[in-house]
């Protein structure tokens, strides 16, 4: 069964050269899988596209950035995030970084701000299969502090716990207010799943997100505003810059 597949079996099934197993995996949470895949592909050289004969994996690559092999995948929700993290966990990748957008749960956080996740509540479905009885999973503290020291100072950054859900359209005012009351500063759809699989495989983990909207203020993904779109673009670029700076710092520390 899939759970029992070994590193060598995955390498063979996906035709991945063993010397291309990446040190770091970056996930971009998004509905726009192919658009973000194309955007992120441009950051890398010597790109190896990871696929499989039956199409289980798409929009996944291994590329080189400043002499570091990095895995990248566009994912949406807990199932995709957990599957890709599982694959690279088996292969021996040591660090996974979740990126993407989130919804703010406090009035002090605005569209375009950055959220550096300290822990994620498992309000989705995948984490329970890797860490039964675990409700909340921590990020790697040293990476949290390291990424904060490397971030762009031009974008407001917030550090704290978030809630991960798997049912975006089931978010109502009552749910948003309850998550906020419990102390969660944002909500996303992948981080808890990614963290759970990372913990299972002994991977270090980090989640850096930009804020898309603030549901508690009556905002949601179907509303558009030119100024907020500009802030989101700046926030996403700040995430990308911080992620690559973190990878460079991580690689330097592991030489």
Image (cartoon, rainbow, N blue to C red):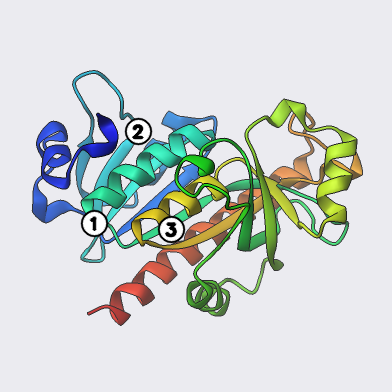
Work out whether mark 3 precedes mark 2 in sequence or the reverse, and give the earlier one.
Answer: 2
Badge 3 crowding class, 10 Å Cα cut-off, few under 14, some 14 to 19, many 20 or more, is some
- Give residue 138's position: percent from left, percent from top: 56, 64
**Rounded to the nearest whole Å, what is the CA distance between mark 3 and mark 1?**
13 Å
Residue name at image x 89 percent, y 46 percent? 177
The image quadrant where one finds the C terminus is bottom left
Q: Nearer the viewer, mark 3 or mark 2?
A: 3
Label 3 secondary element: helix
**Rounded to the nearest whole Å, what is the CA distance between mark 3 and mark 2?**
24 Å
Residue name at image x 71 percent, y 67 percent? 158
Nearest the eye: 30 or 4: 4
In the displayed structure, does residue 80 sit left or right of residue 102?
left
Work out whether mark 2 precedes mark 1 in sequence or the reverse, and give the earlier one.
Answer: 2
**Quarter of the image holding residue 221?**
top right
Label 2 secondary element: loop
Which residue in the protein does label 1 denote?
A: 92
Nearest the eye: 175 or 55: 175
**Quarter of the image holding residue 184?**
bottom right
**Rounded to the nearest whole Å, what is the CA distance between mark 2 and mark 1?**
20 Å
Which residue in the protein does label 2 denote?
A: 59
Which residue in the protein does label 3 denote?
A: 199
- In the image, residue 138 sits, relative to residue 142, either above or below, namely above
């Amino acid at each position: 069964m899939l759970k029992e597949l070994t590193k060598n079996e995955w390498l063979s099934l996906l035709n991945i050269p063993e010397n291309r197993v990446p040190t770091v995996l970056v996930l971009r949470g998004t509905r726009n899988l192919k658009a973000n895949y194309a955007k992120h592909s441009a950051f890398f050289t010597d790109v190896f596209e990871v696929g499989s004969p039956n199409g289980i994996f798409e929009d996944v690559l291994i590329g080189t950035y400043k002499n570091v092999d990095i895995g990248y995948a566009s994912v949406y929700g807990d199932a995709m995030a957990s599957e890709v993290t599982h694959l690279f966990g088996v292969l021996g990748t040591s660090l996974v970084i979740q990126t993407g957008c989130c919804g703010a749960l406090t009035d002090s956080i605005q569209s375009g701000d950055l959220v550096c996740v300290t822990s994620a509540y498992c309000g989705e479905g995948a984490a329970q299969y890797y860490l039964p009885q675990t409700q909340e999973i921590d990020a790697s503290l040293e990476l949290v502090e390291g990424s904060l020291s490397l971030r762009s100072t031009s974008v407001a950054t917030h550090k704290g716990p978030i809630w991960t859900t798997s049912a975006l359209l089931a978010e109502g005012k009552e749910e948003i207010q309850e998550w906020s009351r419990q102390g969660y500063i944002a909500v996303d759809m992948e981080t808890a799943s990614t963290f759970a699989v990372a913990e299972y495989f002994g991977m270090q983990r980090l989640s850096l997100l930009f804020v898309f909207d603030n549901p508690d203020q009556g905002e949601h993904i179907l509303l558009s505003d030119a100024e907020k779109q500009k802030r989101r673009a700046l926030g996403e670029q700040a995430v990308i810059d911080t992620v690559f700076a973190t990878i460079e710092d991580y690689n330097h520390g592991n030489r």
